[in-house]
Amino acid sequence: MVSKETPIWQLTVGEFLEVQKEALKPQTVIQQPEKKFVHGLEGIAQLFGCSRTTASEIKKSGKIDEAITQVGRTIVVDAELALALAKKRRK
């Protein structure tokens, strides 16, 4: 293998083609699934299919605390984690 420090003008044609082939090789890209977030009590209500009052009670119960991030009055909930936690607490 050719060193990365070797100037291009010092490469043979074969070495240059090898380097070029290596550079053009498709790279494996691992895509992570995008997380779905809901915002506020309204988002929690839509996620669980309930009223805002019930959503507030769910939030206050602590059952989905791991899924909730709150800064001041802004509430962001990881939807999948919240559903998994609620399902786990049900059993």
Image (cartoon, rainbow, N blue to C red):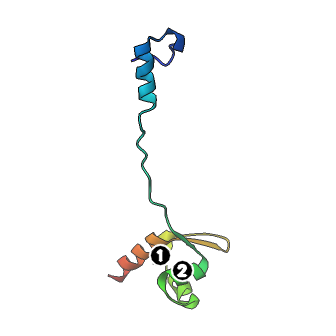
- Label 1 SS: loop
Residue 80: horizontal and vertical position, in percent?
Answer: 44, 71
* N-term-proximal mark, 1 vs 2: 2
Asked whether residue 86 appears in the rendered view, the answer is yes
Mark 1 against mark 2, which lies toward the viewer?
A: 2
Amino acid carrying label 2: it is Ile
Nearest the camera: 79 or 65? 79
Residue extending furthest top?
10
- Does the residue at mark 1 contact the one at mark 2 (Cβ under 8 Å)? yes
Q: Which residue is mark 1?
A: 64
Mark 2 Cα within 10 Å, few/some/many (few <14, many 20+)?
many
Instruction: Tell whether 75 sits left or right of 14.
Output: right
Nearest the camera: 11 or 3? 11
Find residue 44 and name its label. 2
Instruction: Tell whether 68 sits left or right of 88.
Output: right
Amino acid carrying label 1: it is Ile
Residue 73: horizontal and vertical position, in percent?
Answer: 67, 74
Q: Tell me which residue sits at (49%, 70%) in the image.
A: 67
Asked whether residue 7 appears in the rendered view, the answer is no
Nearest the camera: 5 or 11? 11
Q: CA distance from mark 1 to mark 2?
A: 10 Å
Residue 91: horizontal and vertical position, in percent?
Answer: 32, 81
- Label 2 SS: helix
Q: Tell me which residue sits at (48%, 61%) in the image.
A: 34
Q: Tell me which residue sits at (51%, 89%) in the image.
A: 50
